[in-house]
Amino acid sequence: MTLEANLYARDLKITDRLEEYVDKKISKLDRYITNIYEARVDLAYVKSARDAGDRYVAQITIRGKGFILRAEERADDIVTAFDMALPKIQRRIKRYKGKHYQQRTESFPVVDEILLGSDMELHDGDALGLEGPEIVRRKHFMVTPMDEIEAVEQMELLGHENFFIFMNANSGQINVLYRRRDGKYGIIEPEIA
């Protein structure tokens, strides 16, 4: 069974040639890892990018049983951006596989399924009756309990550089993992007053 890409575009026309190219490249990802049930490719043109070389954005997201991996790249043309994101996702797959199998040998608990993601709804701040800053994006995602080590791993696999929200399996609370300026990690444990 070959892997098919779900291709989405924003402010960009997808040609048949580009669609065939993306499908051909994405179909080879299942050679690196099994149990992929979704491969999503988001291609976009961002007119407001500061640098003209960053106007085309390619994001590849793969989901499978127990994992979600994402890579994003920007370039001055969409094919180049996609070609830069592909090896990045392949490196993340190899990294995930290495850590996943290493965890099994060290008998760390393995999360059955992590559903995070790109299922987001866009709202206009004015439509919500808010004054002041405008909220232009709202994300919703399912959380699966995980320990702090798994949260750090998932944060790195998703390519999140600053923070990651997760349900702490030890406390049952929602926590925020963040990267400190010194490169180490911190955890915010909210308490209701």
Image (cartoon, rainbow, N blue to C red):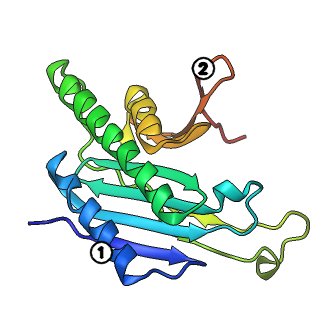
Report the amino acid beneath label 1.
Glu
Which residue is at a point 35% across and 50% down the rendered structure image?
A: 68
> Is 79 in front, or is 151?
79
> Is 146 in front, or is 11?
11
Q: CA distance from mark 1 to mark 2?
A: 41 Å
Label 1 close to label 2 by CB (< 8 Å): no
Query: Which of the image's four quarters has the C terminus?
Result: top right
Q: Which mark is residue 183?
A: 2
Q: Nearer the viewer, mark 1 or mark 2?
A: 1
Which residue is at a point 36% across and 44% down the rendered structure image?
A: 87
Q: What x and y, as percent, mark residue 52?
A: 71, 59
Asked whether, in this view, residue 23 is left or right of residue 82, the answer is left
Asked whether, in this view, residue 66 is left or right of residue 181, the answer is left
Nearer the N terminus, badge 1 or badge 2? 1
Q: Residues within 10 Å of mark 1 (few under 14, many from 20)?
A: few
The reply to whether residue 172 is visible in this rendering is: no
